[in-house]
Amino acid sequence: MFSIDGKLYRLCTWISNFAFLNLLFLISCIPVITIFPATAALFAIVRQLVKNNEISIFKNYWLYFAKNFKQSFLIGIFSACIGLFLFVDFRIINQMQPSLKSFLFSCLVAITIYFILFLLCVFPLMVNSYYTTKQLIVNAFTFSLYKPHLTLLTLIGFSAIVLASLKWTFLLVFFSCSFSAYLTYWFAERKFSSLDSHSVKKESLEFKANK
């Protein structure tokens, strides 16, 4: 039980890794402008954890931070602009007459949810493969609609962690960010596996058709 291969040891290692990663992420977000590069590094690390790869969290976190800095920063600017646009639209709609307000408000809520789904997909895609920034943005919007039940489960799980963090603030300090990223990437990995499976089947059918 207490051996290096025991369940308790693995559980303690798992907990300490998530707590350390969470603290590392929060510290690297202190300058504010580094939030998106820090998020990219966070997802790169949880990708390795999902795949059960043995890595040095501290060393590799900063390597991924530097590696994805430019692209994640551009994604951050793009996301901030969209977020600001949605915020201004909500303020404008709030001043409109009730007859028009309800319809436009519903449409804007739907767009906002879609934007949140984009944010939940863009970083798993960024750390899983190489894309240009334009390709990454387009693929993230498309990927959020693939396997919608997994996307819905991701959103539910993410929301549950946020609500739990509001009730128990120690979770925010030690686990909320790292575990949210882990959960998000875990569901994204299910989508990646499905896409790879379909790709292999398609190539196999094309090969047979060409024989």
Image (cartoon, rainbow, N blue to C red):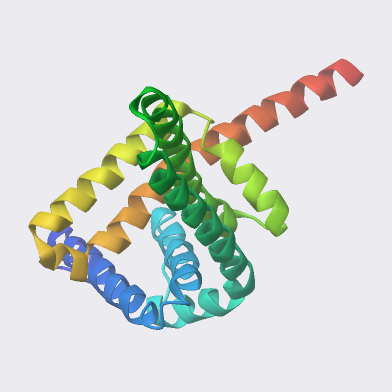
Residue 169: give x, y in percent of width and height.
12, 64
Residue 88 drawn above or below residue 70: above
Is residue 131 at all visible to an observer of this figure?
Answer: no
Left or right for 90, reference 44: left
Is residue 18 at all visible to an observer of this figure?
Answer: yes
Residue at 58% over, 57% down: 126
User: Image quadrant for the N terminus?
Assistant: bottom left
* Residue that protrudes farthest toward the top in the picture: 209
Nearer to us in this view, 189 or 5:
189
Residue at 91% over, 20% down: 210
Residue 201: give x, y in percent of width and height.
68, 25
* Residue that protrudes farthest toward the front in the picture: 97
Residue 17: give x, y in percent of width and height.
28, 70
Residue at 44% over, 41% down: 112
Left or right for 192, reference 153: right
Nearer to us in this view, 20 or 106:
106
User: Image quadrant for the C terminus?
Assistant: top right
Nearer to us in this view, 10 or 115:
115
Residue at 48% over, 44% down: 115
